[in-house]
Amino acid sequence: MFQPNDFKKLLDKRILVHNSKLVIIPTFNEEQSIGVLLNQLAPYPFDILIVDDGSIDLTIERAKASQVTGERLNFLLRREKLGLGNAYRAGYAWALKQNYQRVIQMDADGSHQVSDLLTMLEYSNSHPEIELIIGSRWVKGGKVINWNKGRELLSRFANRYTQALIKLNVKDSTAGFRIYKVSLLSRMDIQGVRSDGYCYQIEMTREARDVGASVAEVPITFKEREFGTSKMSFKIAIEAMARVTFWGFFKAK
């Protein structure tokens, strides 16, 4: 497992290049976890964009008080809750105006590990032809911690159902831990991806495949959040399956 002391070795391998990578983190009432995540990211030269959907707690204050300082920390502050997909679309539009090479998606709740991010970046550096890297729970070596069996079965079923109907050749198409090359994002119709929540990641994977993207999955350990409540619900999962069914039966190419 990577530790901050491995930073020099990572630099020597040219995994991390200053200002070449942007981490986009959507937030909504994540005061208990956002500071922890930002402090874990602080030793590494990532720029960070917080896309906040009108948090009414201390999310923004905790982010500003973190060890990520100066121009590395940026904010898009929205007045209302517009959804995960909307937040990422806004973040991508912001990123495309800047001189970044790669854009990273991470959850604010601590479920995505910085050590796994470094492994994903190492893989990206070793395989420059790969345009989308997915931190996967369901490939060999991937796992989840502190999930109940029902949620695990729901996620596994959703991914198998998606593969059966729209054949993305991805085992974890619902995963939110990702690294996109900006050259891929510039080819994709990002603003045309209208899904939110659980289904957003599926539609982004579908759009990436539609423009001929090369995709790889790297195993991660996904940890259930320690603080706050999950934004995931059965209703969101059902909505996602309905969209996948529509794509599979009525939009087959």
Image: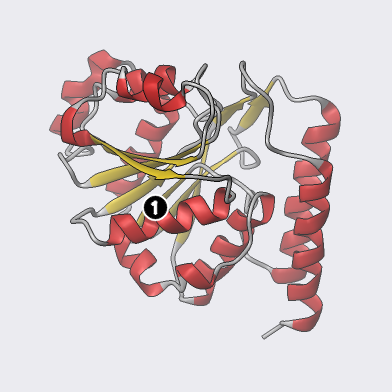
In the picture, the quarter occupied by the C terminus is bottom right
Quadrant in the rendering for residue 92: bottom left
Q: Position of residue 112 (x, y in %)?
A: 51, 30
- 203 relative position to 185: left or right: right
Q: Where is residue 69 in the image (x, y as percent from the top left)?
A: 21, 25
- 208 relative position to 242: left or right: left
Q: Using the image as rendered, state which of residue 100 and residue 68 is in the foreground.
A: 68
Q: Position of residue 238 (x, y in %)?
A: 83, 53
- Residue 1 visible? The answer is no
Rendering colour mode:
secondary structure
- 1 relative position to 29: left or right: left
- Residue 106 visible? The answer is yes
Residue pointed to by mark 1: 91
Vertical placement of residue 107 versus 1, above or below: below
Q: Using the image as rendered, state which of residue 157 and residue 112 is in the foreground.
A: 112
| Residue ID at (83%, 43%) | 234
**Extreme residue in the right direction:** 150
| Residue ID at (74%, 25%) | 147
Q: Is mark 1 on a helix, strand or loop?
A: helix
Under mark 1, the amino acid is Gly
**Extreme residue in the bottom direction:** 253
| Residue ID at (35%, 20%) | 40
Figure disc tally: 1
Quadrant in the rendering for residue 154: top right
Q: Position of residue 169 (x, y in %)?
A: 62, 62
In the picture, the quarter occupied by the N terminus is top left
| Residue ID at (17%, 39%) | 14
Neighbour class for label 1 at 10 Å: few (<14), some, many (≥20)? many
